[in-house]
Image (cartoon, coloured by chain):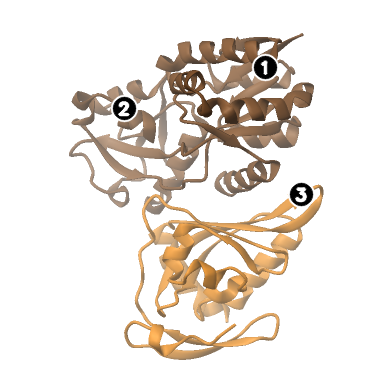
Chain colours: A brown, B orange
Amino acid sequence: MTYNLAISPDFKPELISGWFIFNTWLQRQLGEGVHLEIHQDFKEQHDAIDKGKVDLIYANPFDVSQLVRNHGFTPVAKPSAKPDEAIIACHAGAFTEVKDLPTNIKIAQTDTPDVNTIGMIMLEPADIDKTTVEILNCDNFVVVAKHLMRGEADVGFFLAESFNELSALVKKDLFPLVSSQIHMIHHAMLVSPNMAGQKDQLEKLFTAMSSDQSGQKILAEIGVSQFEPMSTEDAEFMIDLMDTLTT
Amino acid sequence: MQDMNPQDIVGDYTEHELTFHDGSSRKLLVTEEETPFPKGCLIVSRTDTTGVITHANQSFVLMSGYEKSDLIGEPHHILRHPDMPPAAFKDLWDTLQRREKWQGYVKNLRRDGGFYWVYATAIPNIRNGEVVGYTSVRREPSRKKVEECMALYPTLF
């Protein structure tokens, strides 16, 4: 039997080869076929989940709720010390504080759901909400930065990690207005009911990766320092937290 | 719950006696000192089904002014400010009892007698069909909404 592994479409493009290495390692460990499916966007991934074509997924925290509560997925592991935090940035010199923003701003954003949710929450103190803004959809965070630099958007939503990795040349033209410090929202590795029988084995494999050199190398290739176990209650806690943020 | 301690209070204060839904009461010492909400943070806490705090994140600890160990095991109304109308909390509990999400603007009381405004969301934690507790997440509020509440809340007593 061949299982399907999906990676949240918000992964950094330069890590794609790392995920293929991870997939090869996983097949060897399980002695089973695992097909790595790279979905182009969240809609494509959600369609695949709805059709039962995902058995193991490294999921965006925003999707964990749907996966656990509607599709019966079980949490396996989470990356250590790798929370998803968001940054709202503008063109350097345009604004200095969120409270100074007009309500009718244009926002450049990707389709990364947790970053967009946190971003909108951080605009609430300025009385800005979905009804007052214009959205400029972008393929990735570099494109978000370009729109800000060209003055085509007032603010942009970034995954903090991605913002921090922009080149110095780009960053000097941008100004981070606010950075989230939530610490409790993170990606998670989940298994479908179809693969639930492998959950314990997967947890052992993932959490042991950081204890040997070859495992550490693979983890580095996917931008994770180590995996730690994630209980159902850990997932439920994060789902409850996300639930409070979605309206 | 213990009365507030004058030694903890920073600045001039007024005294209030607050009686809670469970019949208990507490002497409050209140100042006019506002602490701004920390940018980009969320204040997160969980309670059991009776409203006793079981989890508090670092932002909760920081903004409340208490030690974490002082918060765990205390009723969530340790934060209750006398300017908050009781009707707001009745609505909160009625909403949670219906297993629905509650949202509202809340003025919270700090250990030092000061206050901070939040936009609060509370939801029931449902596990295997049973409510096992509640999660409350507070975020930075719109100043305009806070000003509206400052005008409205005194009329609700």
C-alpha span from label 3 to label 2: 39 Å
C-alpha span from label 2 to label 1: 30 Å
What's the amino acid at mark 3? Arg
Q: Which residue is mark 2?
A: A165
**B126 or A36, which is in the foreground?**
A36
**For numbered disc 2, what is the local secondary structure?**
loop
Q: Which residue is mark 3?
A: B127
Image coordinates of residue B56 in percent, x first then y, are 54, 61
- Which image quarter is the N terminus of chain A in? top right
Image coordinates of residue A2 in percent, x first then y, are 72, 9
Residue A159 against residue A118 in the figure, above or below: above
**A94 or B67, which is in the foreground?**
B67
- Please give the chain letter of the residue carrying mark 2: A
Pointer 3 and pointer 2: residues touching (CB < 8 Å)? no
Please report whichever mark, 2 or 1, sits nearer to the chain's N-terminal start.
1
Residue B137 against residue A218 in the figure, above or below: below
Residue placed at 64% from the left, 44% from the top? A234
